[in-house]
Image (spheres, rainbow, N blue to C red):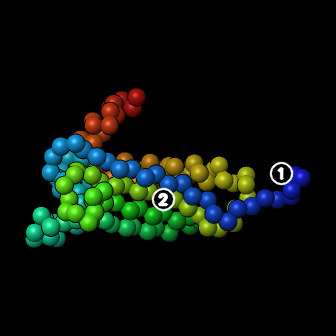
Amino acid sequence: MSAYGVMTVNWVELRYFNVITIEQGDPLDWGNLLADSLTSMISFLKDKSILSRAMNTINLNKSDYKIALRSGLFNSEFPSTLARKEFVLDYECYSDDEKEIDQISGLIRVFHDEIAGLFEASIKDGLREIIGEIKNGL
């Protein structure tokens, strides 16, 4: 880096895009798998049989970076009505402030920890069992 002077970037991002697909079951029933607040928009509908997609977006402004969480029933067969049990958890942490190269690895660690915390808050024990998480942390 010394040959080029101070190197900076103006965008740093870490994104985890999770598509949860369960082979069987009601596409609208995520009760023991996901946080109720992520699926609460479904209860608004009187006739759920006509639903083709339901997505949420949450944007947060931290002091030196931003977080976007997009989640919901994306429906890979859209615009058809829901037929598969699929749910998207899309987490994005980013900074659009100018950063020096040596700051990036620390920032990526912060982003990873933020996303890991959001993921843990998003899922319930039923999904943890499906994905094979062992209670003692192994």
Where is residue 100 shown, x and y percent of the image? Answer: 73, 58
Give SS at disc 2. Answer: strand
**Disc 1: CA contacts within 10 A as few (<14), some (14-19) or many (>=20):** few
Q: Which image quadrant for residue 128?
A: top left
Where is residue 75 shown, x and y percent of the image? Answer: 28, 58
Residue tagged by mark 2?
Answer: 92
Give SS at disc 1. Answer: loop
The residue at the far right in this view is: 3
Where is residue 23 shown, x and y percent of the image? Answer: 22, 42
98 vs 32: above or below: below
Task: Give the number of marks.
Answer: 2
Q: 101 or 63, which is in the foreground?
A: 101
Classify residue 8 as left or right of residue 50.
right
The residue type indicated by label 2 comes to Glu
Q: Residue at x 74, y 61 (%)?
A: 8
- Asked if residue 135 can be seen in this view, the reply is yes
The image quadrant where one finds the C terminus is: top left
Where is residue 66 shown, x and y percent of the image? Answer: 52, 65
Classify residue 126 as left or right of residue 135.
left
Distance between the alpha carbons at the discs numbered 2 and 1: 28 Å
Q: Residue at x 33, y 52 (%)?
A: 122
- Asked if residue 53 can be seen in this view, the reply is no
**Disc 2: CA contacts within 10 A as few (<14), some (14-19) or many (>=20):** many
Residue tagged by mark 1?
Answer: 1
Classify residue 102 as left or right of residue 132.
right
Classify residue 28 as left or right of residue 34.
left
| Sequence-first tag of 2 and 1 | 1
